[in-house]
Amino acid sequence: MLRIATAIALAILAGCAAPTTLIARPPEGLRALRFLETVRLPGALGNTWEFPANTMMVQDRVREADAVALWCGTMIIRDIVAENRQTCFTLNGGTVGILADIHPVGFIRELPEGSVEMTRLR
């Protein structure tokens, strides 16, 4: 039942997806955020959003409506089963706005201190 509710909610949100524009790759590479450890955050519908250790989120696009930079990659949604899902989030210090490519602000969550590092994707 929860899986069905999650699918319906994501389908509704997907209809509201914000247009994004890819960023041209600079010579020094795209900014990236790498998870140093597995991070589990509470999801939107009682599920869990998981970013396994070594997951890379790449700042490779901006939201067209407001030119906000988005960090995009894959997360795992865990409820009854685990599903890989492409997502983008905003980043402000240690706070992320998950699903910011779909939702105007995203679902605001705090990252555990020391769980990520900044790097470049060349």
Image: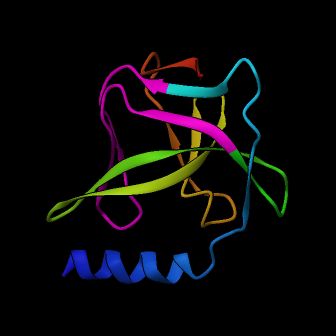
Left or right of 17? Residue 107 is left
Quarter of the image for residue 33 reads: top right
Q: Is residue 96 above or below residue 81?
A: above
Identity of the residue drawn at 37% across and 19% down: 36
* Residue 56 x/y as whole percent: 46, 32
**Was residue 42 drawn as part of the magenta stretch in this picture?**
yes
- Of residues 103 and 87, which is closer to you in this image? 87
* Residue 38 x/y as whole percent: 29, 30
Q: Which residues are magenta?
A: 34-60
Identity of the residue drawn at 62% across and 57% down: 100
Q: Is residue 71 above or below residue 93?
A: below
Identity of the residue drawn at 60% across and 22% down: 122
**Was residue 8 drawn as part of the magenta stretch in this picture?**
no
- Of residues 94 and 86, which is closer to you in this image? 86
Q: Is residue 40 above or below residue 20?
A: above
| Colour theme | rainbow
* Residue 55 x/y as whole percent: 39, 32
- Of residues 93 and 102, which is closer to you in this image? 102
* Residue 20 x/y as whole percent: 72, 60
